[in-house]
Image (tube, rainbow, N blue to C red):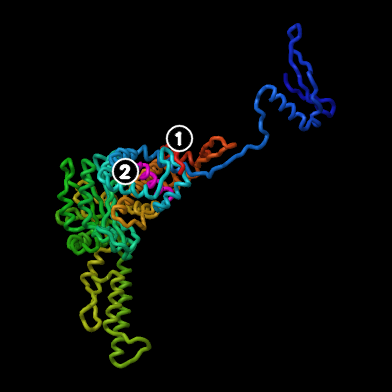
Amino acid sequence: MFVKVTASGPRRYLQLVEAYRDEHGKPKQRTVATLGRLDQLDGQLDQVIAGLARATGKPIADTAPPAIVFESARAFGDVWALTELWHELGFDQLQRVFRRTRHEIDVEALLRIMVFNRLCDPESKLGVLRWLETVTLPGLALKSVSHHQLLRAMDALLDQHAAVEHTVAGLLRPLVDQDLSVVFYDMTTIRAAGLSEQVQDVRQFGMSKEGLIARQFMLGVVQTADGIPLYHEVFDGNTAEVTTLKPTIEKLVSRFAVKRMIVVADRGLLSQDNLAELQAITLACGAPLEFILAVPGRRYGEVADAVAPLHAALFAQAKDETLGETLWNDLRLIIAHNPNTAAAQTAARAQTIAKLEQQATQWAGKLDEQDTGKRYRGRKLSDGGVRAKFYRAVCEAHLTRIIQVDLKSEQFTYRIDDQALQQAQLMDGKLMLITNTQDLSPSELVRRYKSLADIERGFRVLKSEIEIGPVYHRLPDRIRAHASICFIALILYRVMRQRLHAADAQTSPEKALAQLRRIQHHRITLNGTQPNAGLSTTSKEQTQVLAALNLAKPRLPEQLTLL
């Protein structure tokens, strides 16, 4: 039987109809009952339905609207992508390192959380706990995370520092060209907060890269020509850069057994001792270490005699950028000269010297007039005061080698060192490189050196997107652990950048993560039953980002952590 609605004129009736076959087997229908006009049934039909349900023993459907509880949406896409990358690169192998520790916590999982936080929403260790309330973490079996556990994980990281570095080096080895590896080394300063003093404190006062005296520590980073970080080291904040090059390169050579390695370093790392020490380093295969080092301004005097003949013969009349080469202490000295830059630097220096001389002449004239009895409004000038102000102005202009102020004389006197001025003009517009590499042309050597700018971009990522500083940890080991966490985050960032670039995706890693962050995890509860979970729809743009990163689309894994 079934229910049928029939029409009679403008009225509609509800009938209960039975289907049957007659004696000839033909299908027919007959009306069993007419339940009434459809517009007049109102609640009578509900009573019939309830009665039929009771008679058949079936539950009566609740016509009330369901009780729906929505939980707060949590970001999922960005941590999903980072988790996939973490496993693909093999960082989950750190689990084996920490199984041998005395800690009962899941150190690898906690480190993973802190690394992902640096890339998604960098916060303090307490801020990590707030961030965890806004994300869903795939593949983690943690029931809760506390600030104390995060600090214990950092301690475990330093306890197993050698094993962790060995594991990370093994993960990065496939990304390094085993035949020829060009690596770049540079240092930066990281601001540190706090006034307390600790034993073997790395927070020391020194000159920061911003030109200010600040409490800081120094961070040395080595990366490949493709921008992949290979090694890092934390140094005291007042460490001389030249002393860090040899020990860093020796550790690098011991960890990456390549057939040939060329180290490129900036001006601040060149010294006579460094040159001798670098030439003494050999690779595991017996080949010598090769290097490309820029000549700093403080060393110009040492190479001036080698540069002068080449300048006269090649650069003095040059109108376009010109390359030259000569020998210096049995090493190749490569010189790139830009006449436009040289002219601009020479003119700017001459203008600065002229302004300083004009100021000095005014002060000297005023001193002479005071000696004759002439009076001026305000405080009386003195030779010592004028000498101090002028010397400060010369220092700020970085011209102390050219304008030499007599600090011992009772009277204010100075002189222009013509030889130093000529040497400065000789070096204007020049980039000078010292190398023991024999088979690369001058243009190739200059190109390799200019690639060092990419490590500066890496430092900017550390300080801006990853926010390595300022550091509020007090203990030296905690500071080193924080630097290691940020270094691993930088590795993931650079691998993402490399893949996005290879796919010609016009976006950066931070923008890609921001796009994926909009893929959210949702949970709802209906009528007090088990919660139902789901993911927001993946957009076309998000699909393109995942494809560029060579990662699968997010899905709901069996193991999800909501903290």
Residue 551 lies in quadrant: top left
Depth check, front residue: 431 or 404: 404
| Label 2 crowd bin: few (<14), some (14–19), many (20+), radius 10 Å | some
| Label 1 crowd bin: few (<14), some (14–19), many (20+), radius 10 Å | few
As for residue 451 lying within the magenta part, the answer is no
| Residue drawn at point x = 37 percent, y = 49 percent | 148
As for residue 110 lying within the magenta part, the answer is yes
Residue 103's disc is 2
- Residue 346, above or below 559: below
Residue 181 lies in quadrant: top left
**SS at mark 2 in the image:** loop
Depth check, front residue: 382 or 526: 526
Residue 557's disc is 1
Depth check, front residue: 181 or 106: 106
Say which label, 1 or 2, has the lower sequence index: 2
Give the residues drawn in magenta, as a range. Answer: 105-121
- Left or right of residue 106: residue 8: right
- Left or right of residue 281: residue 463: right
Residue 457 spot, x, y in % from top left: 35, 53
| Residue drawn at point x = 76 percent, y = 6 percent | 23
Depth check, front residue: 42 or 287: 42
